[in-house]
Image (cartoon, rainbow, N blue to C red):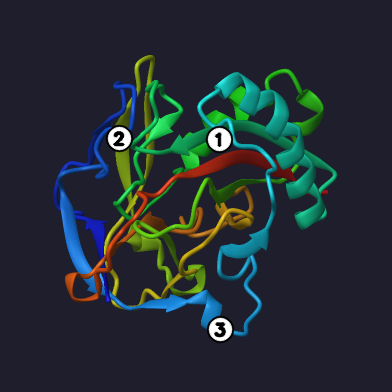
């Protein structure tokens, strides 16, 4: 069994992201902790898709290890990630625009360096996704009339994931009322994401002990989505105490954010 932190829908939901470095693992103090059963994808012979479940296991070797050099990371990996996502999803147009390296041991703390997020959330609301889309396509007007999706590529790096694995709620078990607006305070602006409230219908999945070369694609917004279900809820999760094992390495991972345009 695993512990997850849903949001408490009856309290104000705010997270301050003005600090550099990993910061707090919880997006809000207004949490509702639940113990849930996680289905291990390694034990399931089933096809997962972004359109149905909202996530998809993949294999992609970055062939890179200088994750503390943001400039080198952008110049070397963004083109590779763009090509990979385009191939994986059959997309002609893909724009990689951001990344986060999650490690508590990074020497230099930056805004690209975060702790694993242990609050159930989705990266956007409908309004914040539209604002980000307009910002990223401002110089590309030829793309602005196309349907689009925000897609994240999540990859463990340096070593096996022994704690705080990333888990997902099957999108087909999510309901519109599960989504709550959560305010984010940045150094230069105020934004919002979706905090997720508890629903006993939720079905959770993760992939155990992922190693570099394994990864997950997941959908955090779809311009053609309906009924306020904008993207797949996800969270880093904790092993329930009865299942705890000795941890050699804290989790190190990287996630890339992209816009994929539909034809």
Quadrant holding the N terminus: bottom left
Give the residue pinned by disc 1.
130
- Camera-side residue: 176 or 110? 110
In space, the residues marked 2 and 1 are separated at their CA atoms by 16 Å
Vertical side of 201 occupied by 62: above or below: above
Quadrant assignment, res 175: bottom left
- Camera-side residue: 197 or 56? 56
Decide which of tag 2 and tag 3 comes sooner along the chain: 3
Residue 254 numbered mark, or none: none
Give the residue pinned by disc 2.
183
Give the residue pinned by disc 3.
44
Front label number (1 vs 3): 3
- Camera-side residue: 46 or 110? 110
Which residue lies at the image location 32% right of the left edge and 33% below the top edge?
22
Vertical side of 97 occupied by 229: above or below: below
Left or right, 87 with reference to 77: right
Tags 1 and 3 in contact by the CB under 8 Å rule? no
Question: Element under label 2?
Answer: strand
Front label number (2 vs 1): 2
Which residue lies at the image location 82% right of the left edge and 28% below the top edge?
142
In space, the residues marked 1 and 3 are separated at their CA atoms by 35 Å
In space, the residues marked 2 and 3 are separated at their CA atoms by 36 Å
Which residue lies at the image location 30% right of the left edge and 51% below the top edge?
118
Res. 221 visible in picture: no
Q: Position of residue 137 (x, y in %)?
A: 69, 26
Decide which of tag 2 and tag 1 comes sooner along the chain: 1
């Amino acid at each position: 069994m695993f512990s997850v932190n849903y949001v408490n829908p009856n309290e104000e939901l705010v997270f301050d992201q003005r600090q550099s470095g990993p910061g707090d693992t919880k997006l809000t103090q207004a949490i509702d902790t639940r113990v849930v059963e996680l289905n291990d994808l390694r034990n399931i012979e089933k096809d997962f898709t972004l359109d149905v479940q909202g996530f998809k296991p993949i294999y992609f070797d970055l062939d890179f290890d200088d994750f503390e050099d943001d400039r080198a990371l952008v110049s070397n990996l963004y083109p590779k990630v763009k090509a990979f996502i385009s191939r994986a999803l059959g997309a002609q147009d893909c724009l990689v625009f951001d990344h986060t390296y999650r490690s508590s041991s990074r020497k230099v703390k930056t805004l690209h360096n975060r702790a694993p997020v242990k609050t159930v959330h989705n990266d956007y609301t409908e309004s914040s996704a539209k604002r980000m889309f307009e910002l990223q396509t401002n110089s590309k007007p030829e793309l602005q009339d196309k349907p689009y999706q925000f897609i994240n590529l999540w990859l463990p790096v340096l070593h096996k994931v022994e704690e705080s694995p990333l888990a997902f709620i099957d999108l087909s078990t999510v309901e519109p009322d599960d989504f709550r607006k959560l305010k984010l305070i940045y150094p230069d602006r105020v934004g919002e994401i979706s905090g997720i409230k508890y629903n006993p219908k939720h079905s959770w999945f993760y992939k155990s002990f992922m190693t570099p070369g394994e990864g997950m694609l997941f959908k955090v917004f779809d311009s053609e989505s309906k009924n306020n279900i904008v993207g797949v809820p996800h969270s880093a999760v904790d092993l329930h105490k009865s299942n705890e094992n000795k941890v050699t390495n804290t989790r190190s991972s990287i996630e890339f954010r992209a816009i994929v345009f539909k034809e």
